[in-house]
Amino acid sequence: MNFPKYHGIIPPMVTPLRDRDALDVAGLERLIEHILAGGVHGLFILGTTGEGPSLSYRLRKELIERTCRQVNRRVPVLVGITDTAFQESLNVARWSADAGANALVVAPPYYLPEGQPELQEYLDHLVPELPLPLFLYNMPALTKVAMEPETVRRAMDEPRIIGLKDSSCSMIYLHRILALLPHRPDWPVLVGPEEMLADSVLAGAHGGVNGGANLFPKLYVKLFETARAGDLARVRELHALVMRVSEGLYRIGRHSSAIIKGIKGALALSGVCDDFMAEPFQRFRDPERARVRQILDELNPILNDL
């Protein structure tokens, strides 16, 4: 399979914070180097795992500038510009271009749900004003609106829309999108849920935007590479490890924020960055942190030998 320019593992980086409106700068620098050392193919900031919509615009701008400066074009940097305000999406897009980012990512505006014709018109208005190419982001669980296949098909006619990140958690939806690729063979389709990474790449997707790659980037890169090569026995082994990460770290808390808390908590306990959470969420307390430590102690000896 010939893979497009944007492919492989592009982690949705967490945003290291030290309080409500301040980055953990040293932690951010360590995190970027940790992720890049895993051989990833790009970096995505200000997404769901990065708590993008919960951060002030001032802080988003600082994060974009610091990340692009440190990455220094070693891999492409993608920046989330999703917002309820059209003009703010444009502002973040311009900051991204000025800082040296490579592409933008947008999900449907998430307060008042729009119909598919309205979503298409929104894209028709947004794209001509953007300074960088755009990925679509299908995240219906959080935006209340899906990027329906017909909307995606129409988006393929716009050269400056260059791919899709799908976090629908639906293999049926994914197969419907993959069936559209003959219209645009250069169009990458990336999946968010890491539990679907192996099956998705085997089905024809081009990689993953997987939260666990903040912690264990080599694991996700190797799973992508083995799935791309069709090494099914090794795929099963690595997929089982990804499921151990998911079933362990992401199910410690009782709410949807548990995934980000688990990733940030594990990074903090690994000495990478602070686990401060953007409001309205709070980091794990001591009992949960003890469980995170236990899981890391179980996983690290295995994953260090990859």
Image: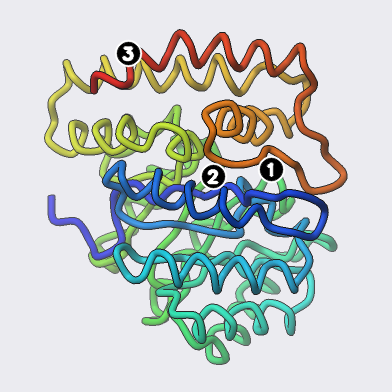
43 to the left or right of 17: left
- The alpha-carbon separation of the residues under discs 2 and 3 comes to 28 Å
* Residue 80 screen position, x and y as percent: 58, 65
Residues marked 2 and 1 touching at CB (< 8 Å): yes
Instruction: Please give left or right for residue 70 compared with residue 110 in the image.
Output: left
Residue wearing tag 1? 141
Vertical comparison of 157 with 305: above or below: below
Residue of label 3: 302
Q: Residue at x 39, y 50 (%)?
A: 33
Q: Residue at x 47, y 40 (%)?
A: 214
Q: Secondary structure at mark 1?
A: helix
* Coloring basis for residues: rainbow
Q: Quadrant of residue 123?
A: bottom right
Q: Nearer the viewer, residue 91 or 5?
A: 91
Residue 2 at x, y percent in the picture = 13, 56
* Mark in front: 3 vs 1: 3
Quadrant for residue 213, please give it.
top left
Q: CA distance from mark 3 to mark 1?
A: 33 Å
**Disc 3 and disc 1 in contact, CB within 8 angstroms:** no
Type of the residue with mark 2:
Ser
Give the percent coordinates (x, y) of residue 90: 65, 83
Q: Earlier in the sequence, mark 2 or mark 3?
A: 2
The residue at which mark 2 appears reads as 167
